[in-house]
Structures are given as structure tokens and as C-alpha cells.
Amino acid sequence: MAALPATPCLAGFVGFRRGDSNGDGNVDLSDGITTLTYLFAGGENPSCEDAADADDSGAVNLSDAIFTFLYLFTGGEPPPAPGPWDCGDDTRAPDGLGCQDIGSCDPELLSADASGFDRFSLSF
């Protein structure tokens, strides 16, 4: 019988929500503004560059803020995997971006409210 090393599911996991540039757990207007402030007004580096790379192009640039605004206000495509709702890994080949802070994807915070009540959509 072969023995495999036991590894906890969350060991070393640094997940993120794509588009959540400010790490507050939501993708909203403030994320596009955070990206623009970082790029053009001397704002702080995002603690998770993968999250700030809203269009998953492999770089944080103006197109990420535009992508976020189009998603939020014109019904544009949602940010690619892991998406704006769920925490997860970058599914692309290594792009040089990473996460220094797990922020809102901290397993302890996620287990505190697994109700899903923060997920809703508005229809007009």
C-alpha cells in the first residue's frame, strides 16, 4: 500500500476574488478606483496583484479598471476565474503576479459566513 503525505486542503492556499483590487471581499466601484489610484496617483501597490488583474491579462494596467467598470455598469463579462464571487487560484499559467495577503479569502473569515446572503443580483 502506498502512503501519500497528508496535506490540509487550505495549507498554503492564497485565494482571491478576481477584480477585488482593494481586498474588501466585493467587486464594486471602489476596486476600479483603487486600480486607477495605484496606476496614476501614487496609490499603494495592491496586496493581491492577481485580484487587481481584473481581465486576467497578466498585468495590472488601465484595461483592468475599464474592464471592472464595464462589468459593473454595462453588463460586461464578469472577471475570469476564479471570478468576482468565489475565492480561488489563478487558473492561467504563471504570469508573474501574486498575492501577498489573503485578505477577504482568509479561511477563518470564509467559514464565519457561508450563508451566501451577500450574493444577490438586481434586475430592472
Image: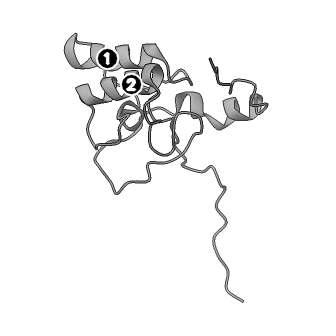
Q: How many marks?
A: 2
Q: From the image, which quarter does the N terminus lie in? A: bottom right
Which residue occupies the foreground of this view, 6 or 52?
Answer: 52
Q: Secondary structure at mark 2?
A: helix
Q: Which kind of residue does numbered mark 1 sit on? A: Glu
Which residue occupies the foreground of this view, 48 or 71?
Answer: 71
User: Which residue bears the numbered disc 2?
Assistant: 70
Residue 64: x and y, percent? 31, 29
Residue 96: x and y, percent? 28, 46
Residue 53 located left or right of residue 6: left
Q: Is residue 55 above or below residue 2?
A: above
Residue 64 located left or right of residue 84: left
How far is the residue under mark 2 from the one under mark 1? Answer: 23 Å
**Sequence order check: which comes first, mark 2 or mark 1?**
1
User: Which residue bears the numbered disc 1?
Assistant: 44
Label 2 packing within 10 angstroms: few (<14), some (14-19), many (20+) = some
